[in-house]
Amino acid sequence: MSFASHPAFRNFQPTPASIPPRNVVLRQVTPKDKPVYLHNLNPLAFLLRAAQIYPNKLAIAHPDTEHPVFYSFSVWCQRVQNLAYALIHVDAHFGFLAARCVFTPINIRLKPTEVEYIIEHSGSKLVLCDREYLHLLAGVRVPVIICDDTGKPDDPYEQFLAKGREFSAERSWQGLEAEPNENAASTLCYTSGTTGRPKGVVSTLRGAYLAAIGNAFESQINRDSTYLWILPMFHAAGWTYPWATVFAFATQITLRTVDYSLIWNHFLHSGVTHYCGAPTVQIGIFNHPKAKRLERGITAIIAGSAPTAHLISELEKIGIKPCHTYGPFTRCYEYPEWKTLSLEDRSKLMARQGQTFATAEVARVVYQPDPDLPLDKVVLVDVPKDGKTIGEIVTKGNIVMKEYLNDPEATKKAFRGGYFNTGDLAVMHPDGSIAIMDRSKDIIISGGENASSLAIEQELASHPHILEVSVVARSHPKWGERPMAFVILHPQHAEKWAGRHAEFERDLKEHAKKRLPGFACPEWVEVVPELPKTSTGKILKTELRKRVNNMKAKL
Amino acid sequence: MSFASHPAFRNFQPTPASIPPRNVVLRQVTPKDKPVYLHNLNPLAFLLRAAQIYPNKLAIAHPDTEHPVFYSFSVWCQRVQNLAYALIHVDAHFGFLAARCVFTPINIRLKPTEVEYIIEHSGSKLVLCDREYLHLLAGVRVPVIICDDTGKPDDPYEQFLAKGREFSAERSWQGLEAEPNENAASTLCYTSGTTGRPKGVVSTLRGAYLAAIGNAFESQINRDSTYLWILPMFHAAGWTYPWATVFAFATQITLRTVDYSLIWNHFLHSGVTHYCGAPTVQIGIFNHPKAKRLERGITAIIAGSAPTAHLISELEKIGIKPCHTYGPFTRCYEYPEWKTLSLEDRSKLMARQGQTFATAEVARVVYQPDPDLPLDKVVLVDVPKDGKTIGEIVTKGNIVMKEYLNDPEATKKAFRGGYFNTGDLAVMHPDGSIAIMDRSKDIIISGGENASSLAIEQELASHPHILEVSVVARSHPKWGERPMAFVILHPQHAEKWAGRHAEFERDLKEHAKKRLPGFACPEWVEVVPELPKTSTGKILKTELRKRVNNMKAKL
C-alpha cells in the first residue's frame, strides 16, 4: 500500500475519542427469540468483522484535503459506535438505537428547496452536513451537525462523535441492540427526480447485505483490493459498495469531488484496483490528459446508464477492465469465445445489460398484453428472445427496493404484475441477455417506427470527433417525430469545426446514414458546449426536450 | 480448458433425455404470497442461473472411468429437472416436489447395518446407489435406483432420469414449485458416529445458500476456476462446494476414488485451481511420488480436522496454497506481516482455526462457570484472550445446523446457552484467533495438567521421519494419565528404523523433550503400519483408546 510512505499518513493521529477501548468486544446484543441457526442479514456485521479480523488494516484514506485522514478498520468501527451513541443521545425520546436509524444520503447538487422537501418527506430527525454544503439547508428546521472534514478534535462533527464515545466504556457494542428484523429499512435514497417530485426508495437490510456480497463477488474485490470513490455515495447508496468493500476487507480512498487529475494520481500511484462510475464519468477518465495505459489492470464497474460500445473499447485500450452491471439486477457476463472478436464487436456485446446478477432473483423483459387491466390484475408476458421486440425490464427478489416511502400508490404501480417495473425498455437476445433500448419516455416515434434514442446515440458516439451525444424526439410535420442530436465535440477536434458546425452536421448525418435506418437518422444536429445532467451523471433529457419544444415554437 | 483436447470429451454424447427442449425457461414458480422485494435463499437458483448464463460451459467432467461423461451446465440442469420429475413419479402419493426432497448422502465406508440404520432413521423413500456399493443395501426395504456410472441410455439411472424427462415438455421448470420456506431442510447428513449411533444433521436452504456463497468468496473461486473433487461429497454435503462451485460458474472434475496418481494427473494437466481435503488426504498428496512443485498455484481448502504446521509448510513447498477453514464457522486469515516470518513460524499461525467466516455470525471460545445449571439456563462466558485458557468453541447463525433429526434432546444439549456447542476445545489468542487444542474427550489429564493431544501431535509431526501421528491418553499408576503416541513412519525412512523401533522411540522422545513440557511428552510410542480412520479421514481415537485399554489390562 503506497500510503505507507505518505507523510500525512505517517503523521496522522485519529481523535482520542476514535481510539477503541482496550479489550473491546465487537459484538452486539442480538434478538433473544432467534433460533440458534438463524441470524439477521445486516451489513453492519461486515464492519464489526473487519474490525475484529483486520483491526490495523487501512480501511479509509481521505488524502486530498487540507487535513487528510486515514482510518483503520478498528478506529472506523469505534467511530461508528460513537456516532450511534451520539445519535441516541440527540434524540433519546424516540428510543431508536443508532444501528437502527435509517440513513438518507442527499444529492449535493440539488436546490435548497429540493433538499428541504427530502428532509421533510423522509421525516429526518438530524442532518449531518459538510460545511461546503451548508447553504443547501437554508430552510431546514431539524438539528444540523456540521463537519469541517478535518478529523481534528475541534471539528464539530468530531465533537459530536466524542459525545457518543462517552457511552463506550459502560455500554460498548453490547449496548447497541441489533435490528430484530432483517427486512427493516437500511437506507432511504431519493430518486434524482428527472420527472416530478423525488421519490424515497426504501431498501432492506437483507437486500443491502445480499447485494453487497453479490457486488464483492462479481467485481472480485478482496482483501488485496483498493477501491477509489469516484461514484458519489448518495447515488443509490453508492451501489452498495460502502458495504461490499468492507465485506471484502478492501481499502477505500475517498475524494471530495470528481477531479480527474486526482483520480489519475490515484490510478497511477495508490494501488487502485476498483472503482464505480456512470458512463459520463468514464468518458471524463479516458479523455483526461493524464490518461495513459495502466500497467496493472483496474476494474471499472459501470452502471447508472447504458455505456456505449465506444466507451467500453476506449476503457479497454488503457487497461481498464469494464464490469458492466445494471442494478445489481443484471451483469453483462463475458464469454470465452468473445476473445476472438474485434474490439469493436466485443464492445457492442459488452454494452448489453446481460443476465441475472449473482444474488438477484430474476430479471425479465416483458409486455402487458392487456394494458387496460387494473394494477392488481396485470399480467406480464416475456417478449420473444429475438433481439428486436421491445419490452420493459422487470425484476424481483431480495435486491429490489421495499417501497417508495409514504407513497403506496407509486409503490403499487411500480410493483404491478408482481415485479418491480423499471421503466427501462429493452430487448432480449437469443442467448437470454438483456439490452436496454431506452427509457420508456425517451423512445422516438418516427414515421410510425420505434426509434431507440439509445441505439442512435450508440452509433453516433462512434464518430471519432464526438465526446458525448444525446438524442431526443422533436416534432416533425410529416413524420410525427424525428431524432434531434445534441453533441459535445471532443476537445482535440473542436477547433477544427469551430465556425463550421453546419459542415459537421452534414458529416455526422453521413456517418449516421451508413449505420442506421432512415427513420433513426438525426434530422437535426446541434453542437453544444455541455449537456444538462443530474449530479449522478445522467443526462437530463427532460431539459433537452424543453429546448426542443421552444425550437418548435419558433418554427 | 484442457478437456477440449480429450478424445473422450470430443466424442461424448449426453443421453437424448439429457438434452433440454428448445426455448427452455429456466424459472420455477415461486410462492405467490412473497412480496416483490423478497425471494427465498435456495442453492438450486445457482444451477438455474448457470444454465441460463453459461449453458455451454463444461460444468462436470468425470473422465477417469470406463465411460467418461462431460456435462455442460445446460445439460446438467436438464438432468436435475429429470431427476425431480422422476422422484415425483416414483412417490406421487406424498406429493412432494423434487426440489423439495431432502438429500441424505451416505458414507460408502459404513457397514450395511449402519447404512440400514441411516436409511430407516432418515425416513428415506428412495435410494440412488452406484452398483459398486450395492452390497451396503442388503437389509434395505425402500426402492433402489442403481447407477452404472456410464451416462449411457441403458444405464438404469439414465432410464430413471428419462422417465422424469417425459414431464419436461408439458410441465418444464414451471411445474416444479419452489420450496416456500427458506428455513426448510436442504440436506440431512449423518455424523460419522465416532461415539454411539450416527446423528442426522439437518441443514437449511438459507444456510446452504449463504455458506456456499461464503465459501466461493473465501476461496476466490470464479468462472475461470476448475475444482477437483477429492473430498467425498457425503462429508458434510461436500462442505457446500457442490453449490459454491456452481454459484461461481466453475468447472468440477469428479473421481470415483481418492487415487493420488489420478489427482496428480489432474493437478498437472487439467487446469485444477481448487480442491478440498481433510489433513490426512493432504498428507497423501504431498507425499506421492508424482508430487512436484506446481507452476500454477492451487488452493487447497483444508478442514475436517486441524492440520499440523508441518502439513501446511509441506503444501506450500510444492505451490499449494492452504486456505484453512473450520466449519465454515471460521477461517485462518493471513496478515501481510506474516510474509516476513520463517515458513515454520508462519505455518504455526496458519494451523490456527482463526476467526469468523464471511457469512457466519460469530464463533466464540467459552466456558460454563456453573456446569451444574439445567440446559435451558446455561450461561456461556468467553475465555480470556491469552492463548492459554482452554474453552469450548461455540457458534451460531445462518451456517449452523437446524437440528439433529428426531432427536430433540441431543439438539437441546448441542444448543445449550443459545449457541451450537461444537465439542472442540480451543484457546483464543490475543488477536482474537481461535486455535483448537482438542476434542473435549481427547484431552489428556497428565499429573493434573491438561495436555492437548493435538498440541503434542503438532510437535511430534515435525520429526522428519514421521508421516502421521496420533496421541491418546493411557492410564498411568503415578500420573493418572500419560500420552501414548501411535506413529506411521515416512516411507522413505521406514527401512532405516526396521527392527529398531525401540531406538526410534528414544529418538522421538528426545525430539519431544526439546519442544514440550514434561507432562506432555509421550510416555509410550508405538510404530504402526496404519491408523484407524473414518472414511472422511478423521483418525478414530476411540479405536486407539480401545487398544490402549487392552494394553493396560495386560500390565
Image (spheres, coloured by chain):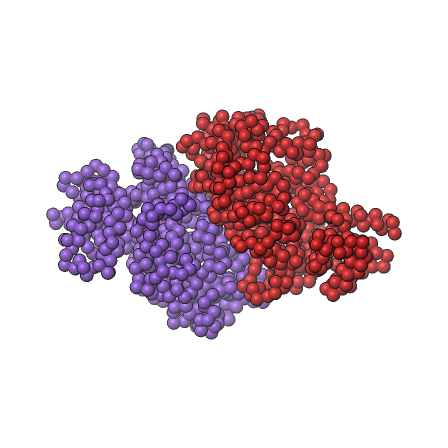
Chain colours: A red, B purple
Regarding residue B3, the answer to whether it shows in the image is: yes
Choose top left, top right, bottom left or bottom right for residue A262. Answer: top right
Q: Residue furthest left?
A: B555
Q: Nearer the viewer, residue B466 or B202?
A: B466
The residue that appears at 39% across and 54% down in the rendered structure is B321
The residue that appears at 61% across and 39% down in the rendered structure is A256
Q: Residue furthest right?
A: A555
Instruction: Note whether A71 is above or below A551 in the view shown.
Output: above
Choose top left, top right, bottom left or bottom right for residue B235. Answer: bottom left
Residue B217: image x %, image y %? 47, 51
Regarding residue B169, the answer to whether it shows in the image is: no
Residue B126: image x %, image y %? 41, 60
Q: Nearer the viewer, residue A22 or B232?
A: A22
Residue B317: image x %, image y %? 34, 56
Q: Is residue A504 left or right of residue A137?
A: right
Residue A174: image x %, image y %? 45, 32
The residue that appears at 32% across and 55% down in the rendered structure is B314
The residue that appears at 28% across and 52% down in the rendered structure is B539
Q: Is residue B273 left or right of residue A541?
A: left
Q: How many marks?
A: 0
